[in-house]
Amino acid sequence: MGKSSKDKRDAYYRLAKEQGWRARSAFKLLQLDEEFNLFENVTRVVDLCAAPGSWSQVLSRVLIKGEKFGRSAWQDREAKLRQHMLNIVPSDEAPGQEKKPGSGDDASPKEQPQPRQDVKIVSIDLQPISPLPGIITLRADITHPATVPLLLKALDPDYDPNSMDPQASQPVDLVISDGAPDVTGLHDLDIYVQSQLLFAALNLALCVLKPGGKFVAKIFRGRNVDLLYAQLKIFFEKVYVAKPRSSRASSVEAFIVCINFRPPKGFKASLAEPLGVGSRLPEMLAARNASAPTTAPVLMQNHDTGAWDTRPVRTTRTTDEDGICEVEVDDLCPEPRDKDTRWIAPFVACGDLSAFDSDASYKLPDDHVSLDPVQPPTAPPYKRAIELRRANGGAYGKPPGK
């Protein structure tokens, strides 16, 4: 969020600096919370790909400091407005009205920050993260199997890193990930790399989430993104695709919101075997095909067209105690009207319609004063490139003869 950023006229960029957020992405998490109430009954959170720490900053202010943003702040404003309209509260406590001088800090208990008990937040990223109150930061790679013991040790100090159990003894309520690769401009490649990063975040989340937990991650919407939704639906009861208003409409970026974690029976997560299968998938498919009953094509009539065609079927023979053989025929090719049946994830737009448009430019007031970044970059990716350029004499190289 430097002054030379090309997005310096972006409304959410400027609003983030005015409100003290490290990056404009904080509004994305807040708007997701407005829609899905992500922070309800949440005390243990893991933030993946957290740098520069804007999402961790939201968690710190909401869970540790007890400040109200997102849905809880909106509900409080609505409650105060209803109470004022019904004359339940005095007019001097109406929303938006300033206190009288000398009234002191005798606000009602509901208006005081209410920190939550036993809060634990762990943030992970390859880039260093400046410290935040109450946040445990780890500098690690979420795609590496060695990250799981580090995370489990941070969540539970009594965890033995030498144990082979990748499951957390003290699971978390929420796992969030705002990570994305360095885009190349080749959309198909960027979408593929982003999907692999999301699978790494999901597989790590499966190790630490408790039943009923939530998972939120950034995705790039592409041609075959429905397959990703279907895979997530295996582990979660509800899966939504959300587009916050602070996310530019011109971007393929969106967020997958998964509610109510319910792993399949017998599932055990591990980074060595992504999604519980890993490299054993070809062997499992071969074994399944070998154990399947023999199929043979038969002549069957199409119920829609009335035409007769050859279709593969599976026959199952059972013999009862009287020696009578019963043959059951199962059609392996369903009717054409069923072959395109698929589950489609709901698409939800998040954020108040009265909020700023992230794709629009707004005129600054005449008395505007430029603000400094809330958190300067600790180790920007371009730092090494700048050092090499300076060593070579600048953008055009060293002069001849030197």
Image (cartoon, helix red, strand yellow):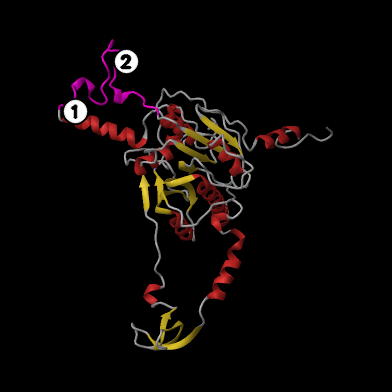
The residue located at (27%, 17%) in the rendering is 99
Q: Residues within 10 Å of mark 2 (few under 14, many from 20)?
A: few
> How far apart are the alpha carbons under marks 2 and 1?
21 Å
Residue 394 drawn at (x, y percent)? 72, 34
Residue 393's disc is none
Query: In x, y percent, where is residue 174?
Result: 45, 42
Whether residue 229 is in magenta: the answer is: no
Quadrant containing the C terminus in the rendered view = top right
Q: Amino acid at mark 2?
A: Asp
Q: Nearer the viewer, residue 89 or 383?
A: 89
Query: According to the image, label 2 marks what residue?
Result: 105
Judged left or right of residue 177, residue 73 is: left
Q: Which mark is residue 84?
A: 1
- The image position of residue 399, as x and y in percent, is 79, 34
- 76 horizontally vs 21: left or right: left
Q: Secondary structure at mark 2?
A: loop
Q: Main secondary structure of the magenta part?
A: loop
Q: Which residues are magenta?
A: 87-115
Q: Does label 2 or label 1 sit earlier along the sequence? A: 1
> Which residue is rendered at x = 50% and y = 56% of the image?
267
- Indicate the quadrant where residue 285 lies: bottom right
Whole-percent x, y for residue 345 in the image = 39, 56
Residue 311 lies, with reference to residue 193, above or below; the image says below
Report the side of 148 relative to 358 (left or right).
right
